[in-house]
Image (cartoon, helix red, strand yellow):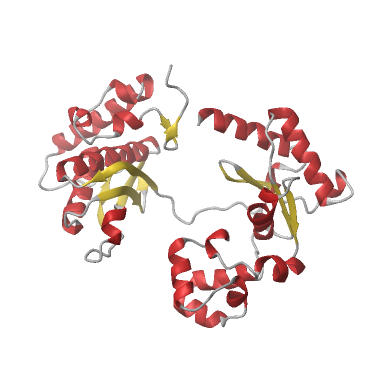
Amino acid sequence: MNLYIEENIKINKVFQQFASDDDIHPYSIDESIIDMTTSWKLFGNSPYEVARKIQLAVKKETGIYTTVGIGDNPVLAKFALDIEAKRNHSLIAEWHYEDVPDKLWPITEFENVWSIGQQTTKKLKSWKFNSMYDLAHSNPYELKARLGVVGSQLFALSWGIDRSIIHEKYIPKEKSYGNSQVLPKDYVIQSEIEVVIREIAEQVAARLRAHHKSATVINLGIGFSLAETTDSTRSRPGFGISMKINPTNSNLELTNHVLRLFRKKWHHESLRHISISCGNLIDDNTQQLDIFDTKDDELKNHILDHTIDDIRKKYGFNSLVKLSSKSKGATAIGRAGLVGGHAGGNAYD
């Protein structure tokens, strides 16, 4: 993954030869969106010709062949990329609004369309929507009534409409910190599950401290294993639960809160996914004391957490771990060398 990231950076630097930084949006680890509305004429006689020049420049710099989707807006470019370009010999495709009836509306497999997942597909099929044409010619108000804002987005999508502007940077209304894991196997033993929950909670707490923030809301998300979700007696795909808390970034306090949430909602289903996030953040320069705890105990925990952070920052995560992270089911040590959940390529370091 480290090598993957390095190559991604190189490719985006090539893009900077053709567009300004403000017009380049790294969409994911292997895709970027470039708004070339005002710049493509500087490099060729058509967008297709410029796309080919970018393709060759990336190939020369990295040895990697890129796939290019060209469109009147980001979503049409994305459709061109996913639906057509990957199958073309040139690895380039171009979609315009006038192509929507011929290229988008005939699609019957909704999962092949960007942003439409399996659950949404099931709902659409149950409502007798059998193609993108059906979506485009449905009542948009009924779609919104059934699916909320997603229904409005789907209707716009079916007409190839996308009003997003690349150079207007997205600024989230509220910052939060979290972490999640897809477990390597189905977990059903409570002690093993709670070890992983504690490990994740402490990772989130460390992120809060690194950014000098405390959380006043904590969220726990649990995803059940496939065996649970297909069992007719247990139809829940999982659960999500949150609670307001006194401002904290303490390992002990956050762990206790999230374990309390877990024990409240878990009914011995087998698990495959755990996520924890903290929101409604405030600066951690204030501390709200617990009347059932002493100030000395809270101060000692504060010093201990920051000391562990400093040691791990200097010597690596595995330089100091709790004994429970050596127990069966624990994942923190094994995940310490991962980058974005993948092998980082540092196995021989």
Visible in this render: residue 111?
yes
**Would residue 84 appear left or right of 154 to someone viewing this image?**
right
Q: Quadrant of residue 321?
A: top left
Residue 148 appears left or right of 52: left
Residue at screen point 56% across, 79% down: 140
Give the percent coordinates (x, y) of residue 119. Answer: 43, 64
Location of residue 150 in the rendering, given as x and y in whole percent from the top left corner = 50, 69
Which quadrant of the view contains residue 77? bottom right
Determine the residue positioned at 18% across, 45% down.
256
| Picture coordinates of residue 181, whole percent (x, y) | 35, 43
**32 or 170: which is nearer to us?**
32
Q: With respect to residue 192, does 40 lie above or below?
A: below
* 81 w.r.t. 203: above or below: below
Q: Position of residue 71 (x, y in %)?
A: 73, 57
- Compared to residue 349, the image places residue 308 above or below, namely below
Q: Please determine whether, in this image, residue 97 is positioned above or below residue 11.
A: below
